[in-house]
């Protein structure tokens, strides 16, 4: 994962409405700096932060670093698993920085739908300026009952951010 500007990430995190006991999940294959910043944010606010590590080597790195942290839990996670639900937990926010192959995106969004609370938000980091990929994701999001999709394309140097909300009581 390319560098994320810390001050700009703080700006993005302002979309997270303060509330007790929030749960945030993150699909990540690399990017210790982003995980560290999100982890600090979650620890400070006493939010649960589950990092679904899609690369085993990244999981090993994070497992040792956060083994004694109450709020941060790295999980060795295969995108190929039949369901993404773990221990019946639902998340208000879902960050996606892992690369999701084109042929897997539809299935990925379907499985994610089941772990996001109604009106929860999915935040997808996309390569900067790739409008074709952005429109493919938006189309798939709509197909899988996510609404109010919007893009932030002027915040980060290397990424565009796609944000969408899980529709109440539909699909999944």
Image: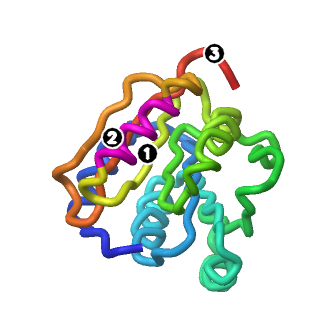
Q: Which residue is mark 2?
A: 15
Q: Which residues are magenta?
A: 131-141
Q: CA distance from mark 2 to mark 1?
A: 10 Å
Query: Was residue 93 drawn as part of the magenta stretch in this picture?
Result: no
Q: Main secondary structure of the magenta part?
A: helix
Say which residue label 1 marks: 123
Q: Earlier in the sequence, mark 2 or mark 3?
A: 2
Label 3 to label 1: alpha-carbon separation: 19 Å
Q: Is residue 67 visible?
A: no
- Kindly identify the residue that appears in the image at 65 percent across and 67 percent down: 54
Q: Would you name the residue on which mark 3 appears?
A: 170
Question: Mark 1 packing: few (<14 Cα in 10 Å), some, or many (20+)?
Answer: many
Number of callouts? 3
Q: Is residue 107 visible?
A: yes
- Earlier sequence position, callout 3 versus callout 1: 1
Q: Residue 103: x, y in percent?
A: 62, 49
Mark in front: 2 vs 3:
3
Pinpoint residue 83: horizontal percent, then vertical percent: 80, 44
The quarter holding residue 80 reads: bottom right
Question: The residue tagged with tag 1: helix, strand or loop?
Answer: strand
At label 2, counting other C-alpha atoms closer than 10 Å, the crowd grade (few under 14, some 14-19, many 20 or more) is few
Left or right of 119, for residue 128: left
Query: Which structural element holds mark 3?
Result: loop
Would you place residue 74 above or below residue 154 in this image?
below
Q: Residue at x 65, y 74 (%)?
A: 55
Considering depth in this image, is 148 or 99 the residue closer to the camera? Answer: 99
Mark 2 vs 1: CB contact within 8 A: yes
Q: Position of residue 2 (x, y in %)?
A: 35, 74
Which colour assignment does the render follow?
A: rainbow
Q: Helix or strand or loop: what does disc 2 sit on?
A: helix
């Amino acid at each position: 994962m390319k560098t994320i500007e810390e001050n700009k990430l703080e700006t993005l995190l302002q979309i997270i409405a303060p509330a007790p006991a929030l749960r945030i999940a993150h699909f990540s294959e690399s990017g210790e700096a982003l995980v560290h910043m999100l982890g600090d944010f979650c620890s400070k606010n006493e939010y649960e932060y589950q990092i679904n590590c899609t690369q085993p080597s990244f999981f090993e790195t994070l497992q040792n670093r956060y083994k004694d942290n109450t709020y941060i839990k790295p999980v060795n996670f295969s995108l190929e698993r039949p369901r993404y639900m773990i221990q019946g937990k639902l998340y208000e926010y879902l960050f996606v920085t892992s690369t999701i192959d084109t042929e897997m995106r539809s299935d990925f969004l379907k499985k994610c739908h089941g772990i996001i609370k109604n009106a929860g938000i999915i935040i997808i980091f996309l390569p900067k300026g790739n409008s074709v990929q952005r429109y493919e994701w938006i189309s798939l999001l709509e197909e899988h009952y996510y609404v109010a999709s919007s893009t932030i394309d002027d915040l980060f140097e290397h990424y565009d951010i796609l944000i969408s909300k899980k529709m109440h009581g539909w699909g999944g």
